[in-house]
Amino acid sequence: MYDPLINSTIAYNENYPNSYWADISGQAPTDNGSINGDIDVDVAIIGAGYTGLSCALSLAKDYGIHAHVLEANKVAWGCSGRNAGFILKSSGRKSYATMVDHWGEEVMRGVYAEMEFGVNRVKSLVAQMSQFGVNCERQSAGFLKVAHKPSMMKTLVAQAKLQQKTLAGIATSEIDILTAQQVRQHYMDDKNAYGAIRYHDGFGLNPLKLAWGYQQLAQQAGAKIHTSSPVIRWQKENNRHVLQTPTGKVHAQKVVIATNGYTPKNFHSLINNRTLPVLSQIIVTETLTAEQIAACNFLTDNVVMDTRALKYYYRKLPDNRILFGGRGAITGKGAEDPYYADRLLAVLKTSFPVLASIHYQYAWAGWICMSLDDIPHIHHDENEDVFYAMGYCGSGVSFSAQAGKRLADKVAEQAIPNLPLYQKPLPKFPLAPLRRLGQWGYFHYGKIKDSYF
């Protein structure tokens, strides 16, 4: 599998992975084809995932700038088409409590507001997609954060109370505190659930259809989406950027990097050694029978995540399968090893022992993008003609829509909120060549922490 810490060029003109989403979502919408010859544009966007498509849409609708999006493979071939489809008010891996400690309540509330804008932007765009007949298979609202052992309930309760206090007046959702018995009686009989907090917002949807909807909205607004057009060389000539693709060149005044976890090694000096791509693994089971659903008391289609350092997450899909995800291999070379999918299935069966005979029908992996300080960053170079949004830390499905809008604001030279997300560059990883060794160490630490502390 393509590995962005090893490969200096991205895979080119590949099909979607053998995922559940690619199998059920039907035919992809028509794009504008590959770059053919030389073109001159105001703005080029590299990467046709959520971020790049949202940026292209906002540039066109808000500022009348018709960007050209360059994608090496197909629209949403990367993480945007491979994720679990969780729409959450997420902030990377940095908790709101930590933000208060680092930056104070005012900044934390500003970050929360941006995350809420992201969710609302997704909802608005999903509604607009209906004109194209796009159904993102949105499920009911609700997000359960489950304590994976009794001691973690104290942490969850403290988290809920802090948010209720500090977000009073801006938070639009309630938080319920649930006992283990309430979780198992009213939501699902997860034997690894020792209580939970439940947010009234957050929901699941089909992430690939979401991206295809963004594509059609962006094209309708005037953006051009070019697939099978990887950037294989990047130079600057006469104060313009020249992006070489296999079949032509794009001359651009400004360039947006929207490749996140799929950014090739040494792609641009602005972002080199500032991210850590990490593999996430997902399985989707066979369709559960009515008897199996009843035996699990699986009453909810809310999205679920636990409190482990090495988190697991799941939801019941509209066709009564279970999507279950967690960490994958450390390197691309190990991504196809069935060990990682088998491990997820084994953990799933500890939550629902009555499913001891269940199998998974789909298994795939994808790269998420970690930042050193656990938050995403939307920034630019000193000339303000190269921009990026990266480092969502596995929580970018909804915020990437807002990040794309803020990228468009920056490109159009408009003011945006004074928040660490937008005013500071991605920090460099110290001893960057040893990032994978640090990841390996963290995974082992996480195993010990999750089991014994």
Image (tube, rainbow, N blue to C red):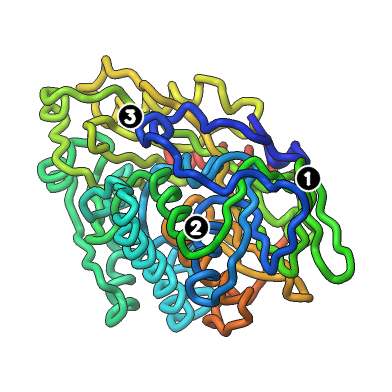
Residue plotted at (52% across, 78% down): 103
The image shows residue 317 at horizontal and vertical percentages of: 27, 37
Tell me how far mark 2 sits from mark 3, CA to CA. Answer: 41 Å
The answer, for residue 374, to whether it is visible in the render is: yes
Residue type indicated by callout 3: Leu
Tell me: residue 68, above or below residue 194. below
Tell me: residue 346, above or below residue 226. above
Horizontal side of residue 123 vs 243, given as left or right: left
Residue plotted at (23% across, 55% down): 141
Residue type indicated by callout 2: Gln
The image shows residue 119 at horizontal and vertical percentages of: 36, 63
Residue plotted at (17% across, 46% down): 183
Which quarter of the figure has residue 170? bottom left
Tell me: residue 385, above or below residue 442. below
The image shows residue 292 at horizontal and vertical percentages of: 16, 24
The image shows residue 118 at horizontal and vertical percentages of: 41, 66
Tell me how far mark 1 sits from mark 3, CA to CA. Answer: 41 Å
Which quarter of the figure has residue 184? top left
Of labels 1 and 3, earlier in sequence is 1
Task: Work out whether residue 318 or residue 15 is closer to the camera in this orientation and state it.
Answer: 15
Report which residue position mark 1 lands on.
Answer: 232
Q: Which element carries disc 2, helix, strand or loop? A: helix
Task: Work out whether residue 356 or residue 446 is closer to the camera in this orientation and state it.
Answer: 356
Horizontal side of residue 92 vs 71, given as left or right: left
Residue 219's label in the rendered image is: 2
| In this view, the mark in front (1 or 3) | 1
Label 2–label 1 contact, CB within 8 A: no
**For the residue carrying disc 1, how many other residues have a C-alpha within 10 Å: few (<14), some (14-19), or many (20+)?**
some
Of labels 2 and 1, earlier in sequence is 2
Tell me: residue 394, above or below residue 410. above
> In the displayed image of the protein, which residue is found farthest to the front?
37
